Image (cartoon, rainbow, N blue to C red):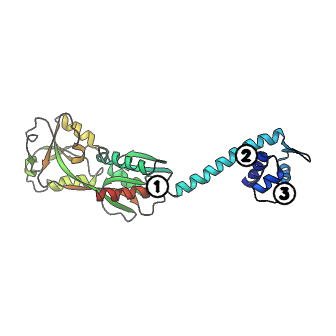
Amino acid sequence: MDTRQMAWFVALGETLHFGRAAERVHMSQPAFSRRIAELERDLGARLVERDSRNVSLTPAGARFLFDAREVLARFEAACRDARLVALGEKGELRLGFMMHAAHRLVPRLAGLYAERRPAVRLILEETTPAEIEVRMRRGELDAAVTFLGRPDPALEALPLLRDRLRLAAPEGHPLAGRERIRPADLAGEALIAAPASTAAPLREAIEGWCAGLSTPPRFAYEPRLQQTILRLVAAGLGVALVPGSICDDRIPGVASVALEAAPQLDVVLLVARAGANPAVAPLVELAADFRGG
């Protein structure tokens, strides 16, 4: 049995007339009558009562009509959804992002994407830059917002914006009132930063900016998350060099100060070059809009 047989019977059940039903499905009446008889034999149940004037449904026929309509509606919906998913207009998109992007970039990106693809379920997964790279290679994420790292032939990095590092210092700290901070100002300071195993581009930028100091700052604490770093700064346990994007909001107990010749970090949209999810395409288009804007 297939959906064609169901469609033939639905035509008969709705018209209760073999001639009109046959015409609806573009079949001759004798051929149509044979198909209905074959359906009844396959089911082992009589579906219609007929005489020279009238056609009526048996109880089994009425039930089969109800169920067949439901099955056909689901089948049509399945076909429609398959086409929409293939076009990237429905389905799911798993977007990973680092915490630095959560303040302004990801909310804006998610909002614009939802406008373009309202039927696509956008699954947002916050994690670290190092984990993003691993999960992208495994195919566990369709795309990700992260720092530009080392080239990977399987992944394409599309520029989104450029972030500058700033100093985060406890309020009342001698450096908190400065207009601009030079590397020499950090000599001997307790520095709080994520380890290279969590965010290699960020750690390299921090170490590079401090590289010329005769007395380099010591890394007193190395938490993985920037939010934890800011809390430690607020508690007076040290200072930190953090992306300016996470300093947009006022952080209680923390002052943000510009750096002289501040290191810049490229924030990118990472996608698989051989990605199979068509819902990624509109996200790639948005990345181009970000670059243009």
Image height of 185 relative to 253, above or below: below
Q: Work out whether residue 104 or residue 219 is closer to the camera in this orientation and state it.
A: 104
Q: Is residue 74 left or right of residue 137?
A: right
Q: Amino acid at mark 1?
A: Ala
Residue 233 sits in which quadrant? top left
Q: Which residue is mark 3?
A: 29
Q: Secondary structure at mark 1?
A: loop
Q: Work out whether residue 21 or residue 290 is closer to the camera in this orientation and state it.
A: 21
Q: Is residue 198 left or right of residue 49?
A: left
Q: Is residue 100 left or right of residue 164?
A: right
Instruction: Please provide percent x and percent y for residue 8.
Output: 77, 52
Q: Work out whether residue 63 or residue 227 is closer to the camera in this orientation and state it.
A: 63
Q: Which residue is mark 2?
A: 68
Q: Residues within 10 Å of mark 3 (few under 14, many from 20)?
A: some
Q: Amino acid at mark 2?
A: Ala
Instruction: Please provide percent x and percent y for residue 118.
Output: 46, 47
Residue 212 sits in which quadrant? bottom left
- Identify the mark nearer the N-term, 1 or 2: 2
Real-space Cα separation, disc 3 to disc 2, in angstroms: 21 Å
Instruction: Please provide percent x and percent y for residue 144.
Output: 37, 53
Name the mark nearer the viewer: 1 or 2.
2
Q: Secondary structure at mark 3?
A: helix
Q: Which residue sits at x=18%, y=34%? A: 253
**Does the image show residue 243?**
no
Q: Which residue is mark 1?
A: 279
Q: Which residue sits at x=32%, y=51%? A: 129
Real-space Cα separation, disc 3 to disc 1, in angstroms: 46 Å
